[in-house]
Every structure is written in structure tokens, then in C-alpha cells.
Image (tube, grey):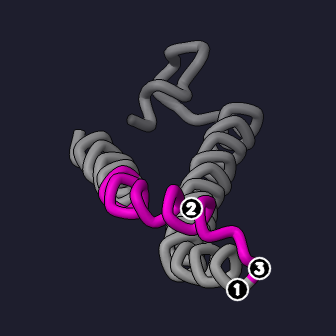
Amino acid sequence: MVEDYDLNKNGVIDPSERELLFEDRRRQMLDADAKRDAQRRMTWFALSGMVLYPLAILGASVAGLSTAAGLIADIANIYVVSVSALVGAYFGFSNMGAKK
């Protein structure tokens, strides 16, 4: 791995090559941190949607939109399964890529 940063192939990591090595490692850490943040936001967004979905049905019913409430309730099971599958697939493929 360190040999990849020995640009002039003299067997010694020069100061300029060391800076390149440290910059690359810093960027890898920032990318990993951004990935974890994105996963956390996606999870909270999906969880919020699944929790607030019944409130949308209730709100439509209270507002006198019984047809809308019925239509929203009809697709509720598809919504929950779809969001769960999306989150599960994202985390599954992310973990598969991390094991390489």
C-alpha cells in the first residue's frame, strides 16, 4: 500500500510523497464519515416517513377527505415494504462493498 505512494520508485517515501499519503488517508476518512452521515440521515428520514404515514391518514380523515384517507391507507403496506426494502438493500450493498 505504501509502495503506491513512492512515485519515483526509489524505495523511500519522500516528504512530498508523505504529504500525498496523508492527504489520501485524510480524504478516505472524510469519505467514510460522509457515508456514515448519509446512512444515518437516510435511516432517520425513512423511519420518520413510516411513523408519520399513519398521521397523514388520520389528518386526511379529520379534514373530511375520506376518499383520500382511504387511498393513502390502501397503499400504506406497499409504502412500508418499499421503504424497508430500500433501506435494507442500501445497507446490505454498502456492507458487501466494505468487505472487499
Q: Quadrant of residue 7?
A: top right
Residue positioned 30% across, 52% down in the render: 85
Tell me the CA gap for discs 2 and 1: 30 Å
- Residue in the foreground of this view, choosing between 20 and 58: 58
Residue 14 % position (x, y): 67, 34
- Residue in the foreground of this view, choosing between 42 and 94: 42
Q: Secondary structure at mark 2?
A: helix
Which callout, 2 or 3, points at the residue further toward the start of the chain? Answer: 2
Q: Quadrant of the C terminus?
A: top left
Residue positioned 36% across, 50% down in the render: 82
Residue 60 in view (yes/no): yes
Three-letter amino acid code of the residue under disc 3: Ala
Q: Quadrant of the N terminus?
A: top left
Which callout, 2 or 1, points at the residue further toward the start of the chain? Answer: 2
Q: Which residues are magenta?
A: 63-82
Residue 36 % position (x, y): 54, 63
Residue positioned 43% across, 28% down in the render: 3
Three-letter amino acid code of the residue under disc 1: Val
